[in-house]
Amino acid sequence: MLQQTQVSTVLTYYERFLQRFPDIKALAAASQDEVMSLWSGLGYYSRARNMHACAKAVVAEHGGNFPRRSELLQTLPGIGRSTAAAIAAFCFGERVAILDGNVKRVLTRFLAFGDDLAVAKNERELWALATELLPHQHIEPYTQGLMDLGATVCLARSPQCLLCPVQTQCAARRAGTQDKFPVKTRKLKRSRRENAWLWLTWGNELWLCQRPDSGVWAGLWSLPEFESPEVLAQAGAGWPGACTALPSFTHVLTHLDWTLHPMRWALPGRATQKQRDAITATLPQGAWFGLDEALAMGLPAPLRKLLQRPAT
């Protein structure tokens, strides 16, 4: 949960998650919908899917016990080299280097490592240097110290060098070039997207479809999307009931600004089963759910907020 999410946001999620899944076997036995429901709002949903798959693998392949070596940990779903090293170091005392974003910043500044980390061989070289610097004892406090330096002192902007315990040994500090490190030329390009959301209701139920296993909100349940409100209106020509445009909003993701136009289409109670089936046959595969059922499922955070908004 703490990968790419702040501690203050994670705390309440973590407590709820552990109450429901107190051990690895409970998590492995749960359905994906149940896991995603408790994760809804944390973002980066592939983390939840990988964690669920990892729990299943640990139970099925390792008897419910995590491997104790970083090499074996890396074979589990969702666990990369740095995460495997962190688990092995903190849980089992293995002498192995981690290299998350904060640690990369600390080490590249400390060593004045100026090679482009967007190039794989340069990152491998930094891994080797990080391994050389490892102490032969007390690996846990050393690893935690590196992480804390990056999180609280060696900040990306305005590093607090006067508070740093290794300031006199830091090559970038001595040269006054802290802002030059780390070097990574490949930048994430932001994009924009715009869609209409169909909030189709019949009585006390709404139509939800499960999103694909890849892409934004992968695996979550959501509303059918259309290119625009105009396209949605054309698709719904001849449908019974009335359509109401709700306030549009922009959902900001790491790489995407996504503007959504919710359109609530209420089918009348007199609509026949044949009419309803004809409408849903034109939509992505899904099912009708009561509101409480829907809110218990894995939903994108903006959809959960929309469904919980008081009716006007």
Image (tube, rainbow, N blue to C red):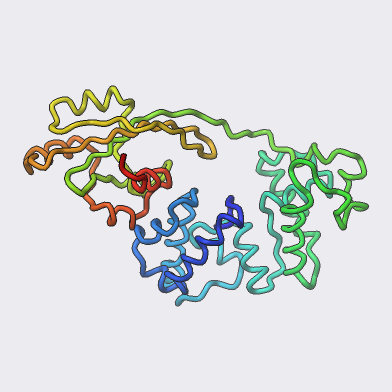
Looking at the picture, does residue 52 appear above or below residue 100? Answer: below
User: Is residue 142 found left or right of 283 in the rendered image?
Assistant: right
Count of marks overlaid on the render: 0
Looking at the picture, does residue 122 appear above or below residue 258? Answer: below
Determine the residue positioned at 40% across, 68% down: 28
Task: Tell me where residue 90 appears, x and y as whole percent.
Answer: 66, 69
Determine the residue positioned at 81% across, 60% down: 133
Task: Tell me where residue 121 appears, x and y as whole percent.
Answer: 69, 44
Task: Tell me where residue 13 appears, x and y as whole percent.
Answer: 50, 60
Task: Tell me where residue 205 appears, x and y as whole percent.
Answer: 21, 48
In which quarter of the view is residue 29 placed? bottom left
User: Is residue 114 found left or right of 192 in the rendered image?
Assistant: right
In which quarter of the view is residue 1 placed? bottom right
Q: Which image quarter holds the C terminus?
A: top left
Outermost residue on the front side: it is 312
In which quarter of the view is residue 61 placed? bottom left
Determine the residue positioned at 27% across, 24% down: 231
User: Is residue 303 found left or right of 108 in the rendered image?
Assistant: left
Determine the residue positioned at 34% across, 63% down: 31
User: Is residue 237 found left or right of 78 in the rendered image?
Assistant: left
Looking at the picture, does residue 48 appear above or below residue 138? Answer: above
